[in-house]
Image: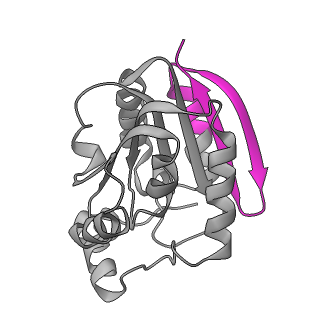
Amino acid sequence: MSGASPAACSPCAFERRYRQSPDPWNFAGSGYERRRYRAVMQALPHAGYARAFEPGCSVGELTARLAAVCGHVVATDVAPSAVARARHRCAALPNVQIHCADLAAGLPPGFFDLIVLSEIGYYFSAPLLASVARSMACALAPGGDFVAAHWLGESADHVLHGDTVHDQLSAVLPLRWRAGERHDGFRVDCWRRA
């Protein structure tokens, strides 16, 4: 699959989408998204985590679910309008912090025992995805879990296909692959830091 132009995947492009529609991918109402959230939560190897990181949190739907099993969740998104929606969605959850930040520019400080990369890997070029993945692996505490979930369809704004994202993660992550499942329309894989 030939990818989208960098401009189509820029922070400004995402902000435009959220200004045109408060939930451009219908994360809050879609049956597909609810199935994906369930699959991600079921893929978590532990019943609870101390500190989680969710880049590309969008409107905070998965963030709120992670907050139920994590002592603290740090979530980020590149679009200020998405961050505002996510903060509103998670306002009653004192264990959630949501920031406007670009994953490609760096990670929040500290270590995490869970990182969830969901629905954003295909917006990176292959070299940038490799760099970001290695940075996230370094931010995992020993014994920490890395979970990735991506749609397997075609989209004009994706640089990479979902399968390519997961294949590349398998190739570059210095982590042990634990499990993976293909669902109707998406894929979930889990790795662990030794």
Splitting the image into 4 quarters, where does residue 77 fall? bottom left
Q: Is residue 170 magenta?
A: yes
Q: x and y percent of residue 152 in the render?
A: 66, 60
**Residue at (42% x, 57% y) in the render:** 123
Residue 153 at least partly seen: no
> In screen coordinates, is 9 left or right of 192?
left
**Residue at (46% x, 37% y) in the render:** 115
Give the quadrant of the C terminus. top right
Splitting the image into 4 quarters, where does residue 31 fall? bottom right
Q: Is residue 76 magenta?
A: no
Residue 160 versus residue 189 in the image, above or below: below
Residue 165 versus residue 191 in the image, above or below: below
**Residue at (67% x, 41% y) in the render:** 43
Q: x and y percent of residue 129 in the render?
A: 42, 41
Where does the magenta region start and end?
167-194
Residue 187 versus residue 91 in the image, above or below: above
Q: x and y percent of residue 156 in the render?
A: 50, 73
Residue in the foreground of this view, choosing between 96 and 150: 96
Splitting the image into 4 quarters, where does residue 15 fall? bottom left
Residue 99 at least partly seen: yes
